[in-house]
Each structure stands twice: as structure tokens, then as C-alpha cells.
Image (cartoon, rainbow, N blue to C red):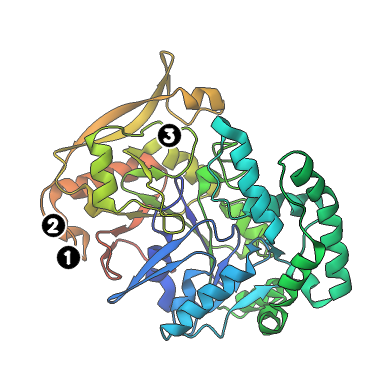
Amino acid sequence: MPGIVLIGAQWGDEGKGKATDLLSSRLDYVVKFNGGNNAGHTVVVGDEKYALHLLPSGILTPGVTPVIANGVVVDLEVLFEELDALSSRGVDVSKLKVSANAHVITGYHRTIDKVTERFLGKRQIGTTGRGIGPAYADKINRVGIRIQDLFDENILRQKVEGALDQKNHLLLKVYNRRAIAVDEIVDELLGYVDRLRPMVADTALELHEALDRGETVLFEGGQATMLDVDHGTYPFVTSSNATSGGAITGSGIGPKQIDRIIGVVKAYTTRVGAGPFPTELFDEWGDFLVEAGHEFGTTTGRKRRTGWYDAPIARYTARINGVTDFVLTKLDVLTGIERIPVCVAYDVDGVRFEEVPVNQSDFHHAVPIYEEFPGWTEDISGARSFDDLPANAQAYVRALEGMSGARISAIGVGPARDAIVQLHDLID
């Protein structure tokens, strides 16, 4: 050991890739345990910027074994596009391991995702249209296709036929779309087999043995706590467990093998897609955060919704995940704001809520109660110790720490790889 879980503490896009990169030189394995290519990490290495969607960000660090675990749904076309793109830039991708039990996203999953979302009209959830939800639905309905199925053509064909029996009726009779041929899907998937075979492994066993040897394994979550299918703002969520519990089921290791749970949280808040967002800004400050923070999705390019820091959400995340440490990112984006509001509680029809309401309707109608903190004008991108930060920036960080339910152990102060202030060791 140790086993370390890294999760998003808001609605995603908090900078988990940067946090992984901070730890990567001391890691042996980096594991993606949930989601698919519906979220992205942007990692800056020197003058190079890498946008990763399906691959774990540890693939950029020499010596680290990157793993796509059983809880992930894999679009094989995207997988090989990303691998080829990295290889063309001189990145060694030969150590990648893919779980034999991970489920596969097929062409019919992408089709159903897009037509279903359009069919919902004003009730759209805001999916990326990449087939992630339908692939997880098939997994739960026990008609999914796993990586291991691709190596037995008879089994693969039977499973595709079974899946399309129902889906083609849906496409033809409900959505007025063409039926999808079994051969079309089977031939596409079989086309990946030769290249895929050397990567496939019993990743749960390999990770267990690595932890028993005392190696360091980071479990890197896609999306974030408030998008978790059980604990997020349902139904405006992703289709998997993006919380620390998802690292257990999504990778096949036991809870006793986890030593540290790191939550990544922005110094303000963003989300993409529909759903409640109490601190959302619709004024010039919202535009300021979009521009100053470059708040556009790594995977979709969509403009993110922006708002002030929400302390009840941070506390909720700390409880749900058992967070031991927070990494606070993008503190530099707040530079130049004279007074910085922080949501400390909510007002719901005249009733004060100190914590996130359990009732979704209450949360939808929650009005943030703000406390303001003095800002700073100094450029903090060169800060490398806490004492390098302006006094008001230090006070802001300490205030957030006191409200958020766990210590803040690192602070992102700029986009560069080394633009980080470390207060506590995140591994030892």
C-alpha cells in the first residue's frame, strides 16, 4: 500500500488531472474506475498540453502503469484514437492495461443516446451523446458486451443479436430510425481484437498484488460527486458511481486497501449540462469566471456554467467520500476580485439549510446565503509556498478549509505543471 482515491468534489472539471500529475512521480499505477469518454482531463507538461478523455492521466508519466478498470465503459474507437495521438507525440503507451470485465460502448449505444436526448425535448439531461448512459443501462440489464466477449466471435454475435432484438424495435417504432444490422456491429468490434488483445488483463488481480507488494496505486475518478448516479443531483447525473465507493466496485479491490481519499475542488464552482446549481451566476462575474478560468469542456467544448464556491457542497462531498484531503484548484482565477462571495448556507422558502437538502425540489429552489471575503490583486502564479500568497488569499483558503470538512493540502495557483502550493504530503 498505499491505495489513494482521487475524486471530484463538485460537478466535475475541478482539475483532477493536475492533482494526479502532482502525485504521478511517486505512483506505480493510475486506475480509471468509472465513466467513459464523457469527461476529460487537461494536463500541462512543460510547453505541451494534453487533453485526455478515456485514458487515465497517469499514462503521461514514464514508469506508471495506467489501468482502465472494470467500472469503465470503453469506446474502442476513442481508445485507439487517443493512444495513436499520444504515440505520435512521443508518449509511451505500451504499459496500458484494460480490464477484461469492462463493458464496451457500441455504435447502437451512441445512436440511442443521441435520439433519446433529442426525444426528451425540454426535459433533456444534458448528456454528451457518446453512448455512456445506454452502455451502463445494458450492463445493469445484463445485455451488455464486455471486453472479453470480443475474443469469442460466437458469444459476441449472440450478445449483439440479443441486444439489438429490442433496440431495433425501439429505433424503428418509437424514434423512426433505421434498424442496425448485427453484422455491422460485430464486424466493427472484431476489427479491434488483434490490437486490443495484448492490453487485456485481470486488472483486479494485478492491482491487488501491486498493493500487497507495497506499491502505490491511485484510483482516479471521472466526473464528480455531484454527478454520482446515487449521490448526485439526480436525474442530472452521470450513469456511474463517481464517488470513492465507486473505486472499490469499479476496480475490484477491497475497502481496507484504501488509505487516502483526496477531493479536488475549485476555488469557485462550475458545472456542465442541466440541473440545479444554487450559486450559478448570470451576470458579469459569471462571464469573468468563464473567461479567466477558460471554462470550456475538455471533451465537449461546451461553455461551463459558473458560480461562487459552495461550502455545503464541499461538506457533503467530504462526508459521502470520507475525504481526508482537499486539493483546491484555480485560486489564481479569483485574482482581481475585490470582494469574493462564498455560499455558507441556503434559504429555501424562508428556511435556512446549513447542509445540502436531501429533497431535490428543495435543492432546486435553494437560494445561496453568502459571506464575503476580501480579495487580492497580486499575481499568485509564482507562489510555491503558502507564505508566498497574499494575506487575503491565505485568509480565503483558511476560511474555505474551515467550512469544507477536511484539510486543504494543496492549492493550484496557475495552469503550469508546477504551479501548485503544497501544504501537506498527499501520500505519506
> Which residue matches tag 1?
382
Query: Badges 2 and 1: C-beta atoms under 8 Å apart?
Result: yes
> Which residue matches tag 3?
277
Identify the amino acid type marked 3: Phe
**Vertical position of residue 402 compared to residue 380: above or below:** above
Q: Nearer the viewer, mark 3 or mark 2?
A: 3
Q: Which residue is rendered at x = 61% and y = 74% of the image?
A: 211
The 10 Å Cα crowd at callout 2, few under 14, some 14 to 19, many 20 or more, is some
Q: Nearer the viewer, residue 88 or 39?
A: 88
Query: Badges 3 and 1: C-beta atoms under 8 Å apart?
Result: no
Instruction: Say whether disc 3 or disc 1 marks the residue closer to the N-terminus.
Output: 3
> Which residue matches tag 2?
379
Taking the image as drawn, is residue 89 in sight?
Answer: yes
Dot 3 lies on which element?
A: loop
Q: Quadrant of the C terminus?
A: bottom left
Residue 180, horizontal then vertical, whole percent: 76, 57
Identify the amino acid type marked 2: Asp
Identify the amino acid type marked 1: Gly
Residue 381, horizontal then vertical, whole percent: 19, 61
Taking the image as drawn, is residue 216 in sight?
Answer: no
Marks 3 and 1, how far apart at CA: 32 Å
